[in-house]
Amino acid sequence: MTPAQRDEGLSDGERHAWGMRVRREVLSDAHVDAAITRTTPLTADFQDLITRYAWGDIWSRPGLDRRSRSIAVLTALIALGHHEELAMHLRAAVRNGLTVDEISEVILQSAIYCGVPAANTAYRIATEVFVEEATDGGSAS
């Protein structure tokens, strides 16, 4: 059962633990461990917030599967030009079951609704990410 399906009495600690599990499944242990290592007193509250809310509440909701959530996230990141996050979520999309061909279709679709320059940049980033993944044997995730 996910936090979204549970009683509203779920503690912040329980939501954080659930969110950390989902975050690790989607982004990889290596990525999450690196983010935790980079946490400072300045960023600690933000790390807690995204773990509890983004991962513990939103990514855990039963209404969409992870593939669908990845498609929505990729499109939003392309539209808003969040390139660093885009690279991370391209890797996550593959972990969530999207193929490189499906990701290419998402980027192509975004060209119409988000703009050709945004899609052009997204293709450049995707190419870099997937070349790196192929070179590293997937260890960069």
Image (tube, rainbow, N blue to C red):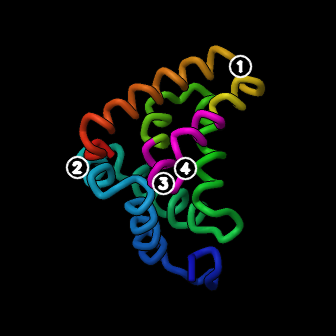
- Give yes or no for contact between labels 4 and 3 (Cβ–Cβ under 8 Å): no
Q: Earlier in the sequence, mark 4 or mark 2?
A: 2
- Give yes or no for contact between labels 1 and 2 (Cβ–Cβ under 8 Å): no
User: Callout 2, which amino acid?
Assistant: Thr
Q: Which mark is residue 37?
A: 2
* Viewer-side label of 3, 1: 1
Q: Residues within 10 Å of mark 4 (few under 14, many from 20)?
A: some
Q: Residues within 10 Å of mark 3 (few under 14, many from 20)?
A: some
Q: Residue at x 44, y 54 (%)?
A: 95
Q: Residues within 10 Å of mark 1 (few under 14, many from 20)?
A: some
Residue 99 counted in the magenta span: yes
Magenta stretch?
91-106
Q: Earlier in the sequence, mark 1 or mark 2?
A: 2
* 57, 24: nearer the viewer: 24
Give SS at disc 1.
loop
User: Callout 4, which amino acid?
Assistant: Leu
Residue 119 counted in the magenta span: no
Question: Residue 141, how many percent across, how many down?
Answer: 33, 46
Kindly report the secondary structure that dominates the magenta region of the rendered protein: helix
Q: Quadrant of residue 122?
A: top right
Question: Residue 123, how many percent across, how many down?
Answer: 53, 24
Residue 40 visible:
no
From what the image shows, is residue 58 above or below residue 1?
above
Is 141 displayed left or right of 72 in the figure? left
* Viewer-side label of 4, 3: 4
